[in-house]
Amino acid sequence: MRSRSIPQLAKPTGLREFLCASSEDFKLVLDEMGGLHLKELIDGHRDAVSCLVIVGPEGGWDESDRQLLREQEVPAVNLGTRTLRAETAPITILSILQYELGDLFPTTQP
């Protein structure tokens, strides 16, 4: 059974510093301009114990941010044709990840 943890909020920092300080074994960035299919990326990371999901600002990423994310090998993911706002995208992606990776439903009966 996976251990439970409460997400922590940190003070604002620059994207480069944030990426350099992250140590999760599964990372992705939501990008409205394109990217991998989420299902393909999830299938390659089903054994991950930690995940970093990066959601961009309202209005999208600029090209310098995209370049930095590529340099740090953070794969871009597109959730399809529906445009999500910055406050709804995290709820959507976390719900999908919890469902796909088994976090919403216990793997054993109590």
Image (cartoon, grey):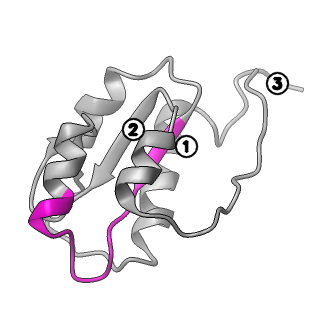
The label on residue 27 is: 2
User: Disc 2 and disc 1: Cα gap in Å?
Assistant: 15 Å
Q: Is 39 displayed left or right of 25 in the figure?
A: left
Q: Is 77 displayed left or right of 55 in the figure?
A: left
Q: Are marks 2 and 1 in contact (CB under 8 Å)?
A: no
Q: Quadrant of residue 30?
A: bottom left
- The image shows residue 5 at horizontal and vertical percentages of 77, 42
In this rendering, is residue 101 above or below 44? below
In this rendering, is residue 110 above or below 20? above
For mark 1, does the 10 Å Cα neighbourhood hold few (<14), some (14 to 19), or many (20 or more) residues? few
Q: Nearer the viewer, residue 78 or 102?
A: 78
Residue lying at the far right of the rendered structure: 110
Badge 1 amino acid: Gln
Q: Which residue is mark 3?
A: 109
Q: Nearer the viewer, residue 74 or 12?
A: 12
Give the quadrant of the N terminus: top right
Badge 2 amino acid: Lys
In this rendering, is residue 47 above or below 64? above
Q: Which residue is mark 1?
A: 98
Q: Earlier in the sequence, mark 3 or mark 2?
A: 2
- Residue at horizontal 33%, vertical 24%? 43
Give the quadrant of the C terminus: top right
Q: Is residue 80 visible?
A: no
Q: Nearer the viewer, residue 20 or 98?
A: 20
- The image shows residue 7 at horizontal and vertical percentages of 69, 53
Q: The magenta stretch spans which residues? A: 51-65
Q: Secondary structure at mark 2?
A: strand
In this rendering, is residue 28 above or below 55? above
- Residue at horizontal 63%, vertical 37%? 103
- The image shows residue 46 at horizontal and vertical percentages of 45, 21
Q: Earlier in the sequence, mark 2 or mark 1?
A: 2
